[in-house]
Structure formats: structure tokens, C-alpha cells
Image (cartoon, rainbow, N blue to C red):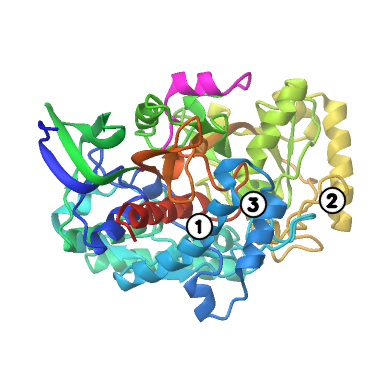
Amino acid sequence: MDGWDYTTDFLVVGSGAGMVGALRAHALGKQVLVVEKSDLLGGSTCMSGGVLWLPNNPLMQREGVSDSLCAALEYFDTVVGDAGPASSMARRLAYINSGAEMVDFLESEGLQFQRCEGYSDYYAGVRGCTGGSARGRSIEPKIFDKKKLGSWRDRIRPGFSGDMVIYTAEAAPMSLMRTRIGMGVVARVGFRTVFGRLRGQKLVANGAALIARLLQVLLRREVPIWCESALTDLVVENGRVAGAVIRRGDLDIRVRARDGILLAAGGFARNETMRKEYSGERPTGTEWTSANPGDTGEVMRAAMALGAATDMLDEAWWMPSWIMPDGTPGMCLSERCKPGSLIVDGHGERYFNEACSYQEAGQEMYARHSADGTAVPSWLILDSRHRSHYPFGMAPAGWTPRALIASGVLKRANSLEELARHCDIPTGSLLATIERFNHFAETGVDEDFHRGEGDHERRYGDSTHTPNPSLGPLEKGPFYAAALYPGDIGTSGGLLCDEHSRVLNTEGKPISGLYATGNCTASVMGRKYLGAGASIAASAVFGYVAAEHASGS
């Protein structure tokens, strides 16, 4: 039809890890356009650790780390199980096989990665789960100097680590600040950060480094990238998605996409209406999410208006969080894995393995709340040894900012009885729970929930603490408590896609010309999080797969 304002072969909507699809399509000889509704590039990828969980990847092969397709499939089977079409065998195979191929391609384009040695799969060593890797399948981008991007250097969304230049794989050992290993990592990160500044560099790590490196290659290839350009509609022509309407400034630009459109614009974590529509009876909302501000779901809605099928819209990448004095959520990661901590519900009872993956922790909170209405919020209980040895959020070991106490983010008491009153928890129940927990800590065996058995649980524990690096008694006051909510870092349900990243309609047939990846899709991981970087990796891999299919490769 006439009336197109701009024509390309492959249109990519969103500028997170899905931009791998833009790079692959251009490498295959296609004209490509990337559009991003924000003034900053990177979306939730930039705000993440930038880690990619990729079984049997080339870096593992080069370093002699044992892995195989069979082991990865076994891991999927025993952890994810039957999660429906989003995690079909065909999609799992595409993810595993194309992931390794994608890394080879990205390295050939100049991207640099390193293995996250010891960053164990989240279910490696967990009872009933086999095929996991204790040494880990995750890789992350090497640190990058944004000055190499020229005028684009200030277009990268800030990362989670602020001005600190730290690899994601360094976070766990750095939390052991009072050990030789921890102090060594602190010194290394501090030297790297300060030395970079002295040299006039603009160093970034984590997700910001991944996006910056992708952007560098796209700019070198002269791929056009439009910021502040939002998709407002998909255009169907003769039963096929032929293009899109892009709102750029005050103009509506009709963009024709000859080979296809890749939707990589994230989910709907920041859309209050959609969250309430799909969350059922669970209490949830935008106030607990740490997702990027642009995670508002309108791109998903555009596909759904064309008859796209969806699944797992009630699911998210859950992240137990406290609420900071400024009202923003603070993610609870290593704190709940360290000795001298436990989590209880409003009855003062433990109800899950506190050191499990953050995805599962959020699910456990909702399941308990659904059963008895007392787990939102739950309470993270700490003793003084925990506070003196390990960080709490951004507060280093041994220092508790007065603002945290004054605001009520952390409740402080000289006795457990007093702490129970502060939290409105039955005193007798809390004391009984901690007495039983302390017995487990002495023996090193959590008879109720098996905390500290998994490889990842031990990694985020304290390797200098025995007999179990994740279990330590709560004995010495003062004691602390933080209210925990089932926050998230983005939604993980959405459009159903096949193994070629084609969006499927409600009859299970592909919508011609329409592809999707990332958090706007129903995850290939089902309702589990298999290892560090599982969401970012899936976004990148299925962006790569979409480009291959759209380009006829």
C-alpha cells in the first residue's frame, strides 16, 4: 500500500538485550531500524547485572567447564517441568543451541565477555533437581569505557551499581567485607573505580556495559536508532504485520518493515491497570517494582489487539524487597542467605528456605499469604553479628544509617521479645521459631527447609562460617527486623511465541511478520529462574533467533 514514511527490512522495538536481533539482522545484510520510546537506551537490561545464563557456551568450552545439551535439558526438566507452550521442548532447544551460537557471533563482532566462575545455577545441588552446574553457566560483559561512544555516551541508562565499577560475579564475595576474600574484592573494585576516574574514563559494568558494547557495534554498522520514538500501532496488510506507527516527537511516522517487526520493549511492571487485571487476588502493584520506568505494557497490548495469545500474565521476576525511606523498593539479595538471618510471617513462623532464588522467594511469599494472609509483609530478622559482618542494602557491614532506623525501614530492639512487639508478631511463636532455627544452625542441617544445601545458597552465604555457610544462630542483640514485600524486577508472562520467536495467535498459529522477545513474552523458563542472567539471556537469544528467521537464514 502507499503512505509509508520510512521503509526498512527489520524493525526492532526496544533497546535492551533484544538489540542483539538488530545486530544479527544487519550482519545478515538487512536494513534495520531500532526505536526506543525513552530518551535513554537499555531499558531493564541496563538496570540489571547484564549477566547471560547460557548452557554449554563457548567460554565454558574454552575453559574446560563440563556441560552438555543433555545436562541442560535435564536441568530444565527437573526444575521447570511442564510449563506449557512457552517452555516447549522446541523452545528449550532453540534457546540452548542458539545461545551458544549467539555468543560466537557477538564475540566475532567485538563484544567481550568473561565467565562468572562459581556463580552456581540457582538449583544446582538442590534436592530433586539434576543437571545444574555448580561452577555456573553465566557470563557477563567486560567493563567498557562509555567515552568510546562519543555523543551517545550519555544515552545509556544508569546501571544498578551507580559509580562503582563492579562485576556482577564480584557482588557475592564483596558482601563478605570482613574476610580476606571480601577485603580483596573491595580493594580491587575500589582501585578499578578510582583509577578509571583518574584516567578520565567513563567506565561501566553490568547491564550498562552490555548495552554500551552492543551500541558501539550498531553505531559502527551505521544502524539508525531513534530515541523518544514510541510504537503506537501495528499495521496489518493482507493478513500480515507489515509495519508500525511510530510516534516521534509530534509526528506519527508509518514505518514499513519488509521482513518483520521484533517486539523487545519489556513487560508491564509499571502498568497499575494491567497488574491488577492479571494478578488475581494477590496484593501487587507498581509501588514494589524495581523495573525500569518504561515498563508499561502498551506494546504488548498492541499485539494482543491483533489476537496474540498470552500466558503466565500473573508471573513476574519476583524480588523480595523492603521499602526505603524515599518510598522506593530496596532489593533483598544476599542478606537473607547469610548466617544470623531468617524470615518469618506475621505469626512469627518460618515458611520457606530463605536462601532460595529470588523468583521462588516471591512465589513462596504469595503462596503463604494466600493460605493465611500473614506473609505480605513478612519479616527479615537479623542479629547483631549479621549487622556487624554483612551489608544491608547499600549500608556496609558495621554501619547502620540512622535514617533506616528513624524511618522504620529497620526496627531495632535489644531483645527478641521487644522486637516481636515492634513488629506485632506473637512473642512466643517468634521465640519458638528462633530456638528451633538456632538448633539447625548448630548442627548445620535445616531439617525444615534444607537451607544451605544448594550450591548457589552456599555461594551467597559466608564461606568462612561452619558447619553451614548459610545458617547461623540469632543470639546476640541488638536485633533488627525489616518488613519484606514481594517486589519484582519486571513481569515474566506475556505473548506466546514459538521456537522461531514468532508471536502466536489464540489458535496457536504464527502472526505473520510479528516476532517478540524478552519480558513482553511468556518466558522459556516457565515459572522458574534457572540461573543468574536467565531473563537477559533469553531476551538476547530469542532476538537473535527472530533475526535469523526473518532474514530467511
Q: Nearer the viewer, mark 3 or mark 2?
A: 2
- Which residue in the protein does label 2 denote? 446
Could you tell me the amino acid type at mark 1? Ala
- Which residue in the protein does label 1 denote? 94
Q: Secondary structure at mark 1?
A: helix
Q: Is residue 84 above or below residue 425?
A: below
Instruction: Indicate the quadrant containing the N terminus: top left, top right, bottom left or bottom right.
Output: top left
How many labels sit on residues?
3
- Mark 3 or 2, nearer chain start: 3
* Crowd rating for badge 2 (residues with CA inside 10 Å; few <14, some 14–19, many 20+): many
- Which residue in the protein does label 3 denote? 388
Say left or right for 6 vs 290.
left
* Crowd rating for badge 1 (residues with CA inside 10 Å; few <14, some 14–19, many 20+): some
Label 3 to label 2, Cα distance in Å? 24 Å
Label 2 to label 1, Cα distance in Å? 38 Å
* Mark 2 vs 1: CB contact within 8 A: no
Asked where in the image residue 151 lies, by quadrant, the reply is bottom left
Q: Secondary structure at mark 3?
A: helix
* Mark 3 vs 2: CB contact within 8 A: no
- Mark 2 or 1, nearer chain start: 1
Q: Nearer the viewer, mark 2 or mark 1?
A: 1
Q: Nearer the viewer, residue 96 or 484?
A: 96
User: Which stretch appears magenta?
Assistant: 263-283
Inspect this view and state whether residue 227 appears: yes
Could you tell me the amino acid type at mark 2? Asp
Q: Is residue 203 above or below residue 424?
A: below
Q: Is residue 149 above or below residue 112?
A: above
Residue 168: in magenta span? no
